[in-house]
Image (cartoon, rainbow, N blue to C red):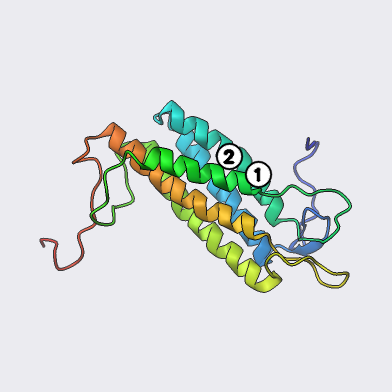
Amino acid sequence: MVHLTRIYTRTGDRGETRLSDNSITRKTDIRVQAYGAVDEANSTIGLALASGDLPESVVAVLTVVQHELFDLGADLSTPLVSDPEWEPLRILQSSIDRLERWCDEFGDPLPNLRSFILPTGTTPGGAQLQVARAIVRRAERTAWQAADEHGLDNPGTKDEPGGLSSLAIMYLNRLSDLLFILARSVTTEAGTKTEAETLWVPGGQREA
């Protein structure tokens, strides 16, 4: 359990922050940007939940996801080491498998897509899930940038910090798929199968 007795610490006033292994890095470190984007995505999911118009089944899924996004942030902020003094919090394959099962559960009943759909919705919660999906995609891209800089699945050495876990980045990829599916599910449930989703019409095919 984490105990927070004081929110402000003044330790970041020089543009530095500590990773979960207590090492110091710059706040501009791309690794910090990656787990910062995860925090942003989690907050956006919270906004979708606060809308109050999501089905209970979707709320249950998103509540689990919110907890796991804290796990993911801890994972991304802990450089890999080969023999850690204590076992760090990491994303496991079982969490990714669960995201995939949810994708199938909520996605299989949906109508097939004939085009891209506009990122909107028939309810505020459904539309907000599209925003969360876009932010998670950005978090994934940023995590890959961090992996390009720090390495992927490589343990650190005495002189070089370790890289990122591929499972952490894989989780983001599957989560963006799930959020897209959940947004579609909420939208089609609130509207009709034919009118709920607005298909993208490419330029040249749209009327002036």
Name the spot of residue 206 as percent of width and height, x first.
14, 61
Three-letter amino acid code of the residue under disc 1: Phe
36 or 179: which is nearer to us? 179
Instruction: Where is residue 37? Give x, y as percent.
Output: 58, 55
Considering the image in quadrants, where does the N terminus appear?
top right
- At label 2, counting other C-alpha atoms closer than 10 Å, the crowd grade (few under 14, some 14-19, many 20 or more) is some
The answer to the question of whether label 2 and label 1 lie on touching residues, with beta carbons closer than 8 A, is yes
Pinpoint residue 25: horizontal percent, then vertical percent: 77, 64
Residue 50 appears in the picture as rendered:
no
Q: Tag 2's secondary structure?
A: helix
Does residue 201 sit above or below 52 in this rendering?
Answer: below
Cα distance in 3D space between marks 2 and 1: 7 Å
Which image quarter: residue 163?
A: bottom right
What residue does disc 2 label? 66
Circle 2: residue type: Gln
Asked if 120 appears above or below 47 in the picture, the reply is below
Q: Is residue 87 left or right of residue 129?
A: right
**Camera-nearest residue between 15 and 22:** 22
Seen in the image, is 39 located left or right of residue 6? left
Circle 1: element type: helix
Residue 96 at least partly seen? yes
Which residue, given by chain and number where applicable, does mark 1 sit on?
A: 70
Residue 60 in the figure: left or right of residue 110: right
- Quadrant of image for the C terminus: bottom left
